[in-house]
Every structure is written in C-alpha cells, then in structure tokens.
Image (cartoon, rainbow, N blue to C red):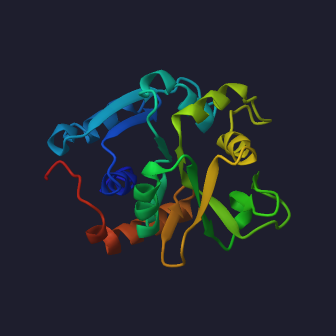
Amino acid sequence: MPLIYYPFSILLNSGYKEFIIVTNKDHIQSFKKLFNFSKKLNISIKFSIQKKPEGIAQALRLQIKKIKKGKDILLFLGDNIFKSNTIINSLKKSKSSDKGLIFIKEVHDPGRFGVYNKEKNNIIEKPKKFISKYAVTGIYKYKYEYLKYLYSLKKSKRGEFEITDFNNILLSKKYLNIVKLKKNDYWLDTGTFNGLLQASNFAKNNNKYFKRISPKD
C-alpha cells in the first residue's frame, strides 16, 4: 500500500472528507493516479503544486484561498505514519473546541526533531543540547483564523518558512493544546532510510488496523 494511504486512513477514520494534497510538479500526476478512486469514498481531493521547496508553512499558506472560510484545518505530513486511537479520538473531540492541536511523542533521539519545551511552552527545532524527550509529530490542527499569522513569517537560515515558527506564534498566544501520545501510540517519521525500513515492517504487520482505501475497494 502506498505510504500516503496511511495518513489518509487516520484522517478518514477521524471523519475528514475534504483534502488538498500539496506536492511538486514532477509528482502531481502520480498522486492523481493514486487517488482517482476518491469519488467511490464520497470524499473531495484537490491537488496543489508547490513550485519551490520553501517550507511546510509556505505550502500551507499557498492553500489559504482554497480553504473554506471558517473551516478547521488539519495539516498532515505525508511521510509520517501513525497507529493511534489517541489522535483519532482527540480530533473528534476537538471539533467543538476553539483551539488547535499539536501532538507530541516521547522519543529516544529528540535531537532529530522539533522538541516541545513545556517550561517555556515553545518548540525548539533539532536542539543540540537536551531540552525534552518529547518530539513534535507531523500532524497539526489549526483554526481557520490562525492562518493570517502565516504572513508574518520570515525565511529561516535554510531558506524556508518554518512550520515550527508558525506553531511558536500560536503557542505564544495560547491557541494550541498539546496532546501527548501514549506509549502504545505508534509514530514513525520515514524521512530516513532506517525509517523507510521500519515503515515496511510496520505495514506488513499492521495493515488490518488501517481503513482500506485502495482502488480495489
């Protein structure tokens, strides 16, 4: 099953039916082919091209005009895999909340990730010194009115508009609730070769957990 089907499974099980997939021009046709069965599931999928790789926050900002005013937004990084009833239940409960959500998970190598600092209520990206063992995962829920703060971001040293900077603005305004994933909640970032190997093993052993969304259904 293609990697992107796994995050879609979590979203479907959480009740979401409208999606925008952001990718580059080289991959957009492949994604359209993967999701050409979306009408059978009674969901709406739009596709958007990010011309330059200038960060996740920029990719989100490019979608503002495509998002219905007042709608909650769930940003899900396509290279993340979760097996988590905590996420599904939290997303369902948050539909009546006036705050967004960030999900954190205890990891053994926090220096690879954005890390949540509870004392200062902010996120430190790939800290060189130990700050916390809780990494920020690749799923974020925002209220529509938060999106205006995307325009106040400046490019980082690596030339991107950082989602961490956006989240820190919202945390400073107390617009986000932090949800701590449990030990039995599974999260995998497949951004490394080792991560891809783990993803393959995970998929082999856990396909029954996920809602099937393949073209054969």
The answer to whether residue 25 is seen in the rendering is no
Displayed quadrant of residue 85: bottom left
Q: Tell whether 189 sits left or right of 156.
A: left
Q: Position of residue 185 (x, y in %)?
A: 48, 72
Of residues 150 and 71, the one nearer the viewer is: 71
Position of the N terminus by quadrant: bottom left
Quadrant of residue 208 within the rendered picture: bottom left
Instruction: Kindly identify the residue that appears in the image at 29 percent across and 68 percent down.
Output: 207
Residue 179: x and y, percent?
58, 63
For image coordinates 65% across by 41% down, the residue present is 163
Q: Residue furthest bottom?
A: 183
Residue 81 position, x and y percent, is 45, 60
Q: Position of residue 169 (x, y in %)?
A: 73, 41
Q: How many marks?
A: 0
Horizontal side of 177 relative to 36 (left or right) equals right
Is residue 108 visible to us here?
Answer: yes
When the figure is inspected, residue 66 is found, relative to residue 41, above or below; the finding is: above
Choose between 177 and 5: the one closer to the eye. Answer: 177
Which residue is outermost to the right?
A: 129
